[in-house]
Amino acid sequence: MGSNSALAAASYFEQERISIQPCQTFDDLFEAVDKGEAQYGMAPMENSLAGSIHAVWELLAAYTPSIAGEIFYHVRHCLIGHPEAKLEDIRYVYSHPQALAQCSAFLLNLEDLDPNNILAEYDTAGAVELVKKSNKKDRAAIASNAASDLHEMQVLAKEIQSHERNYTRFAVLGPQSSPGQQNKTSLVCTLDRSGAGLSEVVDAFTNRKIALHKVESRKLVNEPWAYRFYLECQGDAEDATVAAALADVRNAVRDLIIVASYPAAPRLP
């Protein structure tokens, strides 16, 4: 409890009573939903400061789960330590790698903090629990204010993310209640050479006036000149126009994985 995923779940399901089942890894999260151990799962797809969470995109491609929707959650990070600690005491900081990346400027400005002592943990709230159990006032964690309250710890600094507009977009893994008119579709495809074929992929959508919300490349490790692309387009994959575009894309790439179509969250201003 107290993690940004848990807070995003509470916001998305604000009209319902939910119970939170923590997962230590993204693999555990996808497995829990896939096996029916959890009805829904909050999978962070990208952050407005730190970018896409590649591990989640790879799991989306592997599992192609049903997605109920998405939410942009406003993430506000705090530096959290022991009740008797002071900011100048801190020599070690723990958090999820994404949170550490989002607060990198703040951490670099802590004069007595060795960069080698900025340490990754599986979860922001779990990092607070780790710091509490250490019972050392030179330890701190980056997490939400809610995590500080939950573990009865002290907020040493607030709003430490690099930019106030720090949003994480979560895919809500789980069954859709009813398909909506504002559906979007997430795709993952692989090209042998980044330049060859990409224009055909983009043209497949633009020639049909289908809006592309995301086109991002990622180099495939140990495959010379091969790239994986994350794409998101307006519309449902079963819509005739979108389906025709996807057929053209499939002919232009090595492989195409249609992750899911789902209701889109309102775009941020």
Image (spheres, rainbow, N blue to C red):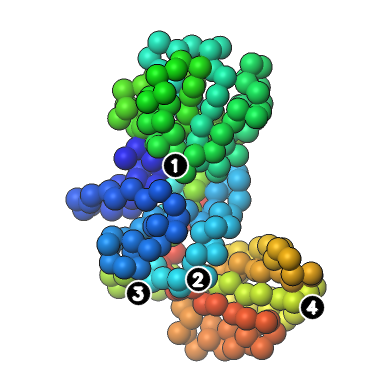
Q: Residue at x 71, y 76 (%)?
A: 191
Q: Which quadrant would residue 207 be assigned to in this image?
A: bottom right
The Cα atoms of the two marked residues, 1 and 3, are separated by 32 Å
Which secondary structure, mark 4? loop
Residue 74 on image: x %, y %: 45, 42
Q: Is residue 142 above or below residue 35?
A: above
Q: Disc 3 and disc 4: Cα gap in Å? A: 35 Å
| Left or right: 206 in relation to 146 | right
Q: Callout 3: few (<14), some (14-19), or many (20+) C-alpha neighbours within 10 Å?
A: few
The residue where tag 2 is placed is: 62
- Per the rendering, the mark at residue 196 is 4
Q: Nearer the viewer, mark 3 or mark 4?
A: 4
Q: Is residue 104 left or right of residue 181?
A: right
Q: Say which element carries label 2.
A: helix
Front label number (4 vs 1): 1
Closer to the camera in the image, 225 or 269: 225
Q: Earlier in the sequence, mark 2 or mark 3?
A: 2
- Mark 1 and mark 2 lie on one chain; the one further toward the N terminus is 2
**What's the residue type where badge 4 is placed?**
Ala
Residue lying farthest left?
17
Residue under pointer 1: 123
- Asked if one can make out residue 183 in the rendered structure from this viewpoint, the answer is no
For the point 50% across and 36% down, the residue is: 95
Name the mark on residue 179.
3
Q: Position of residue 71 (x, y in %)?
A: 42, 54
The amino acid type of the residue labelled 1 equals Asp
Q: Give the residue at x 33% y 61%.
A: 32
